[in-house]
Image (cartoon, helix red, strand yellow):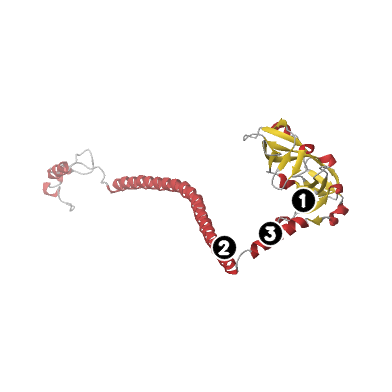
Amino acid sequence: MSERPEYIRQSTLLHQPVANRGATRTFGTVESVWMHPPAHRVLGFICAADAIGEKKWAFNLAQVDDFEETEVIVKSPPAETNAGQVRFLETLLGRELWSDAGNRLGVLSDYIFQRDNGSIHEYLFRPDGLRGWTGSLMRLPSERIVRFGRTRVWIAAQDVSTLLPDEAGLEYKVSQAVQDVRSLPVQAMAQQAKDQWQTLQQKAAQQVQTIAAQATDRAKSLADPLITEGAEPTQRLVQEGRSLWRNVRSRLQDLSADLTAEPDSPPKQQQQDKRSQPRQPPSAASDPEIDWHQIPPEDLDDDTPWI
């Protein structure tokens, strides 16, 4: 029988089944761990009593018979509660960690508590920067916390340099990775690496094609409104120009007809009749100095002077 650990990590309890000794009655799985931030102490945990999740079971730490590796054994029935009351339970998890010098250090994500009395030994936080991207955690002793608010937790600036990485977590990850590597034959590892490389190449090619198609569709969607908006004014200008040209051409034709038309003249028959009539001598009253009776009749129609 393995030795019971003195400390328990909060995250290892989540989703573990809860039952009494002998498993004659089950109470669902652990949904959240119930803590008291001012005292840095775990008081119990909450289980979902139904599939909907509105009805809850609340267990305090004194009701726990044992924290086994894969389940939690309780020795007395729970108290009934609901989701509304559970929402009022306080926790420091998810709050930002700051130094009192005004520097953000990370976000609290887990804690380790003593299994017998629930005292929180230290918090674990995910640091900002590259270390946080790799999934590494840093340890924060609970006594280093000087104060906390609704969204932040503060520690003294001089304590920042003393914070250490979560070596247990790192060792577990490294040892697990080493075991996975050793369990694979060399040829299988090479084939696996080759398959992964081909998969990455295919995904990259598909991604490039997708981005190119999206860019083409985007450019077309931007150009279509411009073409549509510009076509209507252009067509209207062409129609107006054609109408103006027709009006000008009609006016020019009318003006040309007016310029080429002959002035009004008497009918041709009247002109011929007038020419056929003999010239009548002017009356004596028209020119009293000329004696028209002395002019020979044959000279009346001659243009040559008779004198």
* Percent of width and height locating residue 257: 29, 46
Element at badge 2?
helix
Q: What residue did someone put label 1 on?
A: 125
Q: Residue at x 65, y 65 (%)?
A: 182
Q: What residue did someone put label 2 on?
A: 196
Q: What's the CA distance linking mark 2 and mark 1? A: 33 Å
User: Please, is residue 56 above or below residue 111 in the view?
Assistant: above
* Percent of width and height locating residue 150: 78, 40
* Percent of width and height locating residue 223: 49, 51
Q: In front of the other: label 3 or label 1?
A: 3
Q: Quadrant of residue 15?
A: top right
What amino acid does circle 1 point to? Phe
Q: What's the CA distance linking mark 3 and mark 1? A: 22 Å
Q: Residues within 10 Å of mark 3 (few under 14, many from 20)?
A: few
Q: What's the CA distance linking mark 2 and mark 3? A: 20 Å
Residue 263 horizontal side relative to residue 101, left or right: left
* Circle on res. 176: 3
Q: Quadrant of residue 115?
A: top right
N-term mark: 2 or 1:
1
Nearer the observer, 240 or 160: 160
